[in-house]
């Protein structure tokens, strides 16, 4: 199968992201999934081979699928059915989204199970004020009929809390999706730890929340959102095990 230079570069970055999630402890056995839209008019996307740990994912064993769930090109592995339902729905509905990540981290799942959801009262959650959508739990996401409701819940947001389930983030590229997920994960970790500590939580004013959002927009206007952070993590995974590039 011929792979363009652009697709090859995308495969390397996506495989690196799987290794990053592994090192951050954001994997869930052989489940969960991150996808990236392949450049071109075919609407194909890349996703992890079902059955492999995240630290076994490489650029060459990522599976290319179309929006109907058909594997494009040779592959020794199937695709997680839940992964296809979630990612195909978003890639079909949101042309601005290139990368989608979904996790079941403990902190993310804790917040997803709380009726109030994510509060905007810590450093990271303030950045996400008015940016987080919610989708009600309908059971394991394997039914195609849930796709329209999932897409409707996401809307134009890049952050989605799947109630009683986990976290989902979108990005225009691999780097931005990574940083989006990192910010939401940290926001959930801090809220879960704050609640576990007990005591009264200090509220954050709407003015401070707005200032946080503005500061982030200004801070990344020069460096590009997520680029420095993703590049730093790529250096780390290269130092640990560069086999993801294969």
Image (cartoon, grey):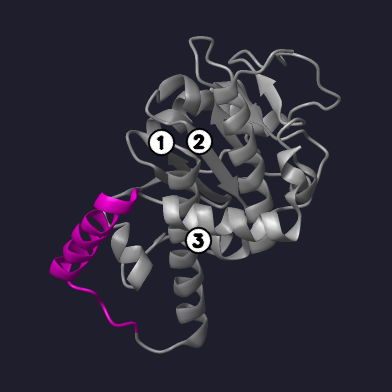
Image vertical order of residue 238 relative to residue 125, above or below:
above
* Image-quadrant location for residue 141: top right
Residue at x-position 67% and y-position 33%: 82
Q: Residues within 10 Å of mark 2 (few under 14, many from 20)?
A: many
The region drawn magenta spans 201-224
Q: Disc 3 vs disc 1: Cβ atoms closer than 8 Å?
A: no
Task: State the separation of the CA atoms marked 3 and 2.
Answer: 17 Å
Identify the image quadrant of the C terminus. top right
Which residue is label 1 attached to? 172
Task: State the separation of the CA atoms marked 3 and 1.
Answer: 19 Å
Nearer to the camera, 113 or 11: 11
Identify the image quadrant of the N terminus. top right
198 on left or right of 206: right
Task: For mark 3, give the secondary structure.
Answer: helix
Q: Disc 1 vs disc 2: Cβ atoms closer than 8 Å?
A: yes
Which residue is label 2 attached to? 99
């Amino acid at each position: 199968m011929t792979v363009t230079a652009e697709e090859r570069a995308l495969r390397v970055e996506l495989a690196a992201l799987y290794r990053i999630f592994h090192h951050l402890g954001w994997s869930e056995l052989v489940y969960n999934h991150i996808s990236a839209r392949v450049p071109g008019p075919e609407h194909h996307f890349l996703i992890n081979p079902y059955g492999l740990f995240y630290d076994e994912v490489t650029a060459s064993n990522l599976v290319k699928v179309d929006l109907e769930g058909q594997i494009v090109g040779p592959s020794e592995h199937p695709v997680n059915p839940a992964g296809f339902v979630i990612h195909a729905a978003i890639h079909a509905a949101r042309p601005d989204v290139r990368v989608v990540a979904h996790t079941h981290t403990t902190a993310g799942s804790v917040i997803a199970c709380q009726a109030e959801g994510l509060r905007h009262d810590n450093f990271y959650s303030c950045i996400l004020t008015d940016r987080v959508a919610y989708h009600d739990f309908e059971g394991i996401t394997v039914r195609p009929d849930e796709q329209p409701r999932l897409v409707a819940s996401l809307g134009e947001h890049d952050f989605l809390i799947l109630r009683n389930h986990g976290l989902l983030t979108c990005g225009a590229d691999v780097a931005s999706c990574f940083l989006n997920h990192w910010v939401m994960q940290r926001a959930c970790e801090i809220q879960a730890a704050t609640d576990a500590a007990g005591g009264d939580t200090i509220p954050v004013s709407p003015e401070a929340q707005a200032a946080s959002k503005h500061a982030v927009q200004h801070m990344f206007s020069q460096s590009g959102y997520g680029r420095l952070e993703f590049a730093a993590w790529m250096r780390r995974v290269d130092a640990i095990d560069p086999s993801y590039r294969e």
